[in-house]
Amino acid sequence: MVGWGAAPSGQGRKPAPRAQQVAASEPLREPPTLKNLSSVPGIVEVNLTAAPARLQLVPGGPRVSVWAYNGSIPGPTLDVHEGDSVIVHFRNELPEMTTVHWHGLHVPNDMDGSPLNPVPPGGSYTYTFRISPGSAGTYWYHPHPDRRTTYQVAMGLYGGLIIRSAHDPLAERGIPERLLILTDNRFNPDGSIAFPDSQSIQAEIDLENGREGNVLFVNGQVAPTIPIRPGEVQRWRIVNASAARVYRMAIPGQSMIHVGSDGGLFEHPREVKELLLADAGRVEVLVRGEEPAGRTVALEDLPYDRYMPQTRPVDWDSTRTVLWLSETAGPPAPRVETPSELRPVPPTDTTHVANRRVIVMSQGLIDQKRMDLNRVDIRARLGTTEIWEVQNVVGMDHPFHVHGLQFQVLDRDGKPEPYRSWKDLVNVPKHSSVRIVLRFADYPGKWMYHCHILDHEDAGMMGILELTR
Amino acid sequence: MLPRLKVPAYVMLVLVIPLVLVSAAAVAHRDGPTPTPFPGSATDTILRGRYLVMSHACADCHGGFNNPANKGWMAGETGPEMAFLIGPCLVTPGAQPCFHTHPRNLTPDNETGLGRFTERQIFNALRYGVRPEDTPDVTITSTTPGEGNFPLHPHYLAPPMPWPSWRYMPDADLWAIAAYLKRGLKPVHNLVTESEGPPDFWANTYKDQLNIGPNPPAPFPTANEVGGGDH
């Protein structure tokens, strides 16, 4: 549909009549999978190249300059199993330095793709790591160079990463799955990806809010359609690869079954009407096809006010369609019993807590400082457990992320977390605090912790945790 | 329903006309003891800060008026009558943009006040007008954006906070105010709504529309003043 990309950021669009939109909607396509070059069981060896390309981003739009992994946006999915040894031959064909950060994975420090280990333009790096037992879940990979993460991700560099368990209670029941990578972007009238002039007020708004685009994508498509048969149950692995957008997702008239978080499945499914997914976070949900056939519903992104009032977008309270769910005619799907037990999530042992810290997030600052790559902010020992109270003292949400591990949320504003799950990212709403428990199991070195609004981390809302033996 | 315009006795602020400020800061008390000189012990600094807070009428806006024993002393807005409306709507009803601003909780509460900010950040707010939550805990040595740790895109305290006048106080006085706020007050939990404002956080307002005056001030005597050696 011509004109999708032409509206400048901040202006809402009235949705077109439903039938017209659905007719213009393409069936969902999933990104390609990285080809395993190894035939040895338990080894996944792949080639990954970040390079400029020219791709069509917007339906009906022109080919524009992008940066892409292996020529596709999203990049190809890295699909591995627990226990696998992974070898990634990475080439940087971009005109600037970059890294590949395996978001959420527990890997050696020099394989984490942090800004401390940049790959120069024209350079190569071999990332090697083992996939930890128990880490099955939905993750993603993206650049993480110093101060250029927002730009490189906006230019198209991001991809999914699926870790599979040998015993997945949903796969064992034959529940089909789909990977949905959510992003947003904005475009100039000529179709190119729009970046504001550094002196402009839009640049200041972006710095405050984080970069938001008016065009929402799923796997690089605009409002695609997912077909589902009545009674069918599908598993959606949803990655929010946005720079800043928080999705408040719901399907009108039906509930979803929430089964997984950043670090994979939790213990028991929970039926929900809506789910909040902050940028860089992941959820896994089960969606059931409802009667009658022929019906089409939207997965909607409902309004959520995460903003400072000074820079709140005028259209923040509009509802957006993320994708269409189309109940197809045909024989109803065989009945699937969703399991009541998913997988154990043992509580992190808090009998010996080495340190209780308070981490204060204000606007662009952590503990009143900006990151200095030469400065260590927190020192901790391997093999210890710590409890961090992450406090947000300002008037907008900040999603807090720690590299190299999965933590558990203990409570939010003192209210205990109703269920245990593994997370590497937790949204800390305005004027609130969240307590998390972290176990520093392995891998010494300097690890980043930061607000995952990309513009904020680029501006230095980040600290360095050094783990030593 | 707009909140009633609150105009404290000594401040009137309209964006379309220059700021007119009559300070109530008395040079000397007539009714009570003169505060002990400083520097001295920490207590002296805190008492000095208290004297400055009282004589600069901070609590007229930030709560408690002229009695530190009053409930809500310096704890920020506790009712809509304490909010401000800033902008051309004061002259032309309905004119935009008009912003509601809210006096903050200046007690050292960790969640809702200044508890997580340092005395240096409070000093920087008074000296340079920059919001402590946006500005790192560093020494600022310039007022040129991007130099001497002055932010490239400063985010200013919302009007009608009279920081452009308070910045003329000597450094020691501003440090004393910071000390009183952080160490002389008990924390009070009172979450004040974030002030509205333009997306540049008043940077253009203070640069172009309100002549906040040079610091140090124009040399005495200017054409409006009488003085000089052979008077």
Image (cartoon, coloured by chain):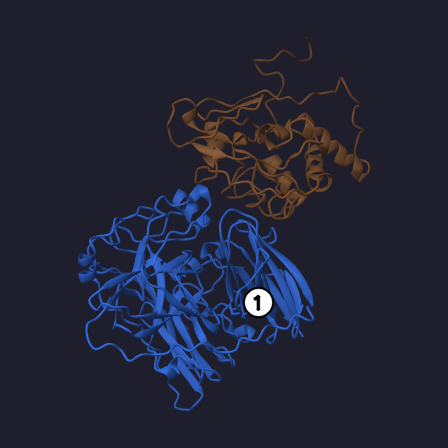
Chain colours: A blue, B brown
Most foreground residue, B228 or B50: B50
Please rate how many residues cluster around mark 1, counting C-alpha atoms within 10 Å: few if below 14, some from 14 to 19, many from 20.
many
Pointer 1: what residue?
A447
- Please name the residue shown 66% across and 13% down the image: B228
Which quarter of the rendering shows the C terminus of chain A?
bottom right
| A293 vs A425, nearest the viewer | A293
Instruction: Quadrant for the N terminus of chain A, please.
Output: bottom left
Which residue is the extreme one toward the bottom? A40
Q: Chain of mark 1?
A: A
Image-quadrant location for residue B119? top right
Q: Position of residue A169 (x, y in %)?
A: 42, 81
Q: Does residue A468 appear anywhere in the picture?
A: yes
Q: Position of residue A4 (x, y in %)?
A: 24, 54
Amino acid type, mark 1:
Trp
- Residue depicted at x 26% and y 54%: A5
Looking at the image, residue A84 lies above or below residue A456: below
